[in-house]
Image (spheres, rainbow, N blue to C red):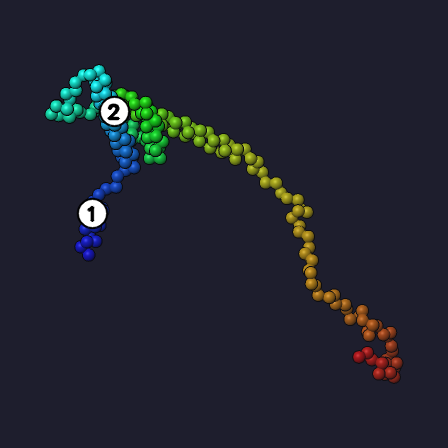
Amino acid sequence: MLSQLFSAHSTSAVPERAESTMTKDCILRELENQMKHLQHIQWEKEREEKQRKNIADYTWLAAAPPKYYEVPPLVQMELEDMCGRVLSIETGKLLERFRDLLEREPDVKEVPLILKAVINETIQNRAEDDSLLDVLRKRSFNTVRLRDKRVHPFNISEQVLPPTRRALSMPEFRTVANYSIFSTPKRTLPEFCAKPDDLPV
């Protein structure tokens, strides 16, 4: 009983993160990882360049390790605001486009600017898609409105259905007068009394 209470309290105490917040954190984390990756590549290139020029490298004697490049505060705020406007369904395509542009290994200082350009491109493409959908919706709506709203009555001959014919119908019953047993000529009363046996059975 107590475990159920504690579990219910713990789940209700942790608020569910908004979808926009998760999208923003995902993009900014990708930016941070890509910047660190490019920073290591640049450090490795500098070390190889010094070895090629026979220049002694004493950076390993330094007490503090080299610092990573940090995004300026103003640029960081702009990126956070722009990332909050990205839809979750656009994240995959945005990150794929961002990684493709980083294959040429630009300077680490250019990475935040590249991300801003990719976000602007994503939002602009979304606006163009929305405008195209609006145009298609308006065209379909106008097409529906242009249809003739008058009701054309059907022809009377089309409404009257042909009589259905029964496959197994009952035989036609003839009237009593049609049978031969009742078709005897009329007799007078004396003739009838004289020959009563001639009555039809």
Q: Tell me the kind of residue under disc 2.
A: Ile
Between the residue at mark 1 and the residue at mark 2, the CA separation in whole angstroms equals 44 Å
Residue 104: x and y, percent? 32, 22
Residue 163: x and y, percent? 68, 55
Pointer 1 with pointer 2, Cβ within 8 A: no
Q: Tell me the kind of residue under disc 1.
A: Ser
Image point 57% across, 36% down: which residue?
148
Q: Residue furthest left?
A: 63
Q: Which mark is residue 150?
A: none
Up-down relation of residue 120 to residue 149 (above or below): above
Q: Is residue 79 left or right of residue 155?
A: left
In this figure, which residue is indicated by the disc labeled 1?
10
In this figure, which residue is indicated by the disc labeled 2?
41
- Mark 1 or 2: in front is 2
Q: Tell me which corner region of the image, top left, top right, bottom left or bottom right, holds residue 37.
A: top left
Helix, strand or loop at label 2? It is helix
Q: Residues within 10 Å of mark 2 (few under 14, many from 20)?
A: some
Q: Is residue 146 left or right of residue 165?
A: left
Image point 28% across, 23% down: which residue?
111
Q: Residues within 10 Å of mark 1 (few under 14, many from 20)?
A: few
Image point 88% across, 81% down: which residue?
191
Image point 31% across, 25% down: which residue?
102
